[in-house]
């Protein structure tokens, strides 16, 4: 009876560890976060994607991220060197215009090693729960001490947040 219990416990442990194994073709990272960042103070919006390292990453690896351009046209491309000691990788797009609420925007990420061989590809979509129209078109502050922007806060006391008319419908 005791031998059967030991064999059963070993079988359960073996199945448990087998279930935790990573598939060989998954790649060294997994998607851990994706969102739009709206910075009201400086009137910017950007994509932010985070990846979690789940396996060793070869020395000399680069992430190439292609973000759909909300204004249309060519995607916005970012090349980010990945360091082997990083546990989390953060990829951020250049500043955006024309982000629309509830519209899915595509993002494609490739990890390429030093010899330019693709070691992982990740495709995802990002949706915003806000339109970029919540942002002013000009930064509210300028300079390192956050001085009020005179283009927004006029000398006569009026305020001009601007309105972006250049966005596609």
Image: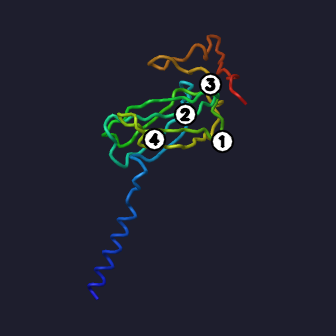
Disc 3 is placed on an element classified as loop
How far apart are labels 1 and 3 at the CA level? 20 Å
Image coords of residue 116 (percent x, y): 40, 34
Q: Is tag 3's residue or tag 4's residue first in the polypeptide sequence?
A: 4
Q: Which residue is mark 4?
A: 50
Label drawn at residue 67? 2
Position of the N terminus by quadrant: bottom left
Position of the C terminus by quadrant: top right
Disc 1 is placed on an element classified as loop
Question: Which is in the foreground here, disc 3 or disc 2?
Answer: 2
How far apart are labels 1 and 4 at the CA level? 20 Å
Image coords of residue 146 (percent x, y): 48, 20
Classify 149 as above or below 38: above
Q: Which residue is mark 1?
A: 102
Q: Residues within 10 Å of mark 1 (few under 14, many from 20)?
A: few
Question: Which is in the foreground here, disc 3 or disc 4?
Answer: 4
Q: Is tag 2's residue or tag 1's residue first in the polypeptide sequence?
A: 2
Q: Which residue is located at x 63 percent, y 41 percent? A: 104
Disc 4 is placed on an element classified as strand
Label drawn at residue 136? 3
How far apart are labels 3 and 2 at the CA level? 23 Å
Pointers 1 and 3 in contact (CB under 8 A)?
no
Q: Is tag 1's residue or tag 3's residue first in the polypeptide sequence?
A: 1
Question: Which is in the foreground here, disc 2 or disc 1?
Answer: 2
Q: Quadrant of residue 40?
A: top right
Q: Residues within 10 Å of mark 2 (few under 14, many from 20)?
A: many
Give 49 or 73, whichever is nearer the viewer.
73
Give 120 or 159, whichever is nearer the viewer.
120
């Amino acid at each position: 009876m005791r031998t059967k219990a030991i064999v059963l416990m070993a079988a359960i442990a073996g199945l448990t560890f087998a279930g935790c194994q990573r598939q060989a073709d998954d790649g060294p990272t997994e998607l851990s976060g994706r969102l739009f960042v709206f910075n009201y103070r400086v009137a910017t919006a950007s994509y932010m994607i985070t990846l979690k390292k789940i396996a060793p990453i070869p020395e000399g690896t680069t992430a190439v991220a292609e973000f759909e351009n909300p204004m249309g046209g060519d995607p916005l491309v970012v090349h980010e060197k990945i360091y082997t000691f990083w546990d989390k990788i953060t990829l951020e797009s250049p500043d955006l215009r024309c982000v629309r609420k509830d519209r899915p925007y595509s993002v494609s990420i490739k990890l390429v090693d030093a010899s330019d061989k693709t070691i992982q590809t990740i495709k995802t979509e990002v949706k915003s729960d806000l339109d970029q129209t919540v942002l002013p078109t000009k930064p509210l502050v300028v300079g390192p001490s956050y001085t009020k922007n005179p283009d927004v806060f006029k000398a006569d006391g009026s305020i001009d947040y601007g309105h972006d008319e250049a966005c596609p419908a």
